[in-house]
Amino acid sequence: MKAAEQNASLLALYIGRTGALRCEYLSVNVTIVDAKRSYGRTLLLVRPVSGTGERWVDEGRITWSTDTETAMPVQNGM
């Protein structure tokens, strides 16, 4: 498997997951609708669970559930 295909497979694991996006003093529940790598960072396209709009955010701004069913994969070298 090529490196690009492997990265795409790992990024696909984000899609459909839910988490909480930190926004200053708020935490908003969001669903991940897309993911990409840009300049060595993982960016996620998020939509609020309740409400409208979408935005690309850095993966580090998302707090993931500790539930094993929704736990994110370990990123080795990504």
Image (cartoon, rainbow, N blue to C red):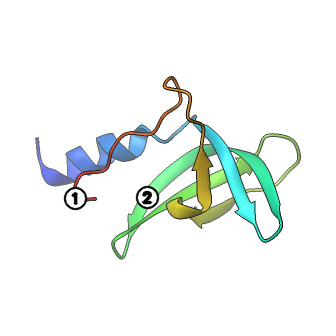
Residue visible at 48% across and 34% down in the picture: 71
Q: Which amino acid does label 2 sit on?
A: Lys
Q: Residues within 10 Å of mark 1 (few under 14, many from 20)?
A: few
Q: In this view, does 24 lie above or below 78?
A: below
Q: Is residue 39 above or below residue 15?
A: below
Using the numbered discs, state the Cα–Cα distance from disc 1 to disc 2 in whole angstroms: 15 Å
In which quadrant of the rendered image does the C terminus lie? Answer: bottom left
Q: Decide: marks 1, 2 in contact (CB < 8 A)? A: no
48, 61: nearer the viewer: 61
Residue 25 image position (x, y, % from top left): 83, 67
Q: Which amino acid does label 1 sit on?
A: Gly
Q: Viewed as shown, does residue 47 lie left or right of 6? A: right
Which labelled disc corresponds to residue 77? 1
66, 36: nearer the viewer: 66
- Please tell me which of labels 1 and 2 falls first in the chain: 2
Q: Of all residues shown, which one is farthest toward the bottom?
A: 39
Residue 6 image position (x, y, % from top left): 22, 45
User: What is the count of numbered marks?
Assistant: 2
Which labelled disc corresponds to residue 36? 2
